[in-house]
Image: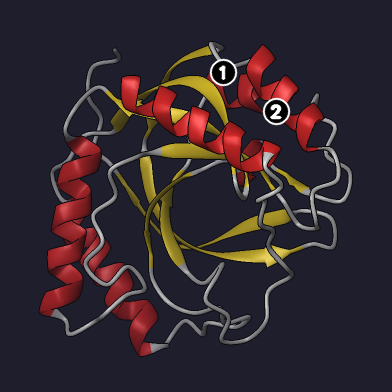
Amino acid sequence: MSDFSEFRERGRAALLAGEATHDVPMVEGGARWGAAVVLRPAGEVAGRLTDLAATVHAPGHWVHGGPALHVTLRSLEPYRSVIPEDDPLRRAYAAALAEAADGLPPAWVYLAGVAPHQGGVLVGAHPVDETLETLRKRFARGLESRGVRDLEYGRVRDRWYVSLVHFAAPLTNAEEIVAWCDAHADTDFGLAELPVAELVQFVHTGAAIRVDELDRVPLSSSPAR
C-alpha cells in the first residue's frame, strides 16, 4: 500500500502543478485505446465503484462505470475501429489468451484507495493471489511464441488499478478533483473477483467509453474468498 500512497502523492502534485494530460477521441492508428486484454470486476464491488464515480464533478471528461470498469492485463496494438473476426492478430491474441488462462482460477483483487494522476482518477487493485501475475507472464510468452509484438514492448506492469475517470479535455478544476480524491483516499471497496479474461476493443460513445468484447476466456471456478 505504501507504493500506492506514493503514487497518489505524485498524482496530487502533478494536478495541482497544472500538469494534467488528457485523451482525445480515438483515431485510426493512434497509440491509445487499441485492442487490449482486460478483466472486469464482478458483483457488488463493481456497483460500489460505479456509484462513487458518479459523484465526481468531471464535466467533459470520461467517467467510467458498470461494464466499462476494468483491470488491464495488456495493451496490444494501435487503435483500429474495425477488427474482423478472421483478422490474424485477433486470432493470435485469442489463442494466446486461451493458452495463458488454461487451468487458472479467477483472480481476486482488493480494491481500495482513490488516487488522482496526470490523466485521471483510479482505484488501486491489490492482488491477493498470484493469478494476475501468472496470467500476465503466460500471455506474454504466448504472444512471443506467435511472433506478436504488442504495445507494451516488454514492459512489466507493477501496478494494477481500475480507472474511474480519464480526462478528455484540459483540466479546469484540478483543486476540486484533488479534494474529491482526498475525501475518498481511504475508501475500501472490498474484494473483487475477476472471473473472465477478455480480448476487447474500446469505443468512444461521444461522452464516454464503451468496452466491447471480441473474445473471452472464463477462468475456472475456485472457492470464494
Q: Residues within 10 Å of mark 1 (few under 14, many from 20)?
A: few
> Is residue 45 shown above or below 28?
above
> What residue appears at the point 58 percent right and 27 percent down from the top-left corner?
46
The spot of residue 110 in percent (x, y) is: 38, 20
Which amino acid is tagged 2? Answer: Val
Secondary structure of residue under mark 2: helix
The residue positioned farthest toward the right in the image shown = 59
Residue topped by disc 2: 178
* Position in image of residue 63 (x %, y %): 74, 42
Q: Which residue is mark 1?
A: 44
Amino acid carrying mark 1 in the image: Glu
Which of discs 1 and 2 lies nearer the camera? The answer is 2
Determine if residue 116 is in view.
no
Residue 27 visible from this viewpoint: yes
Q: Which residue is at the front of the view, 108 or 94?
A: 108
Using the image, tell me which numbered label, if any, was put on residue 23: none
Quadrant of the frame with the N terminus: top left
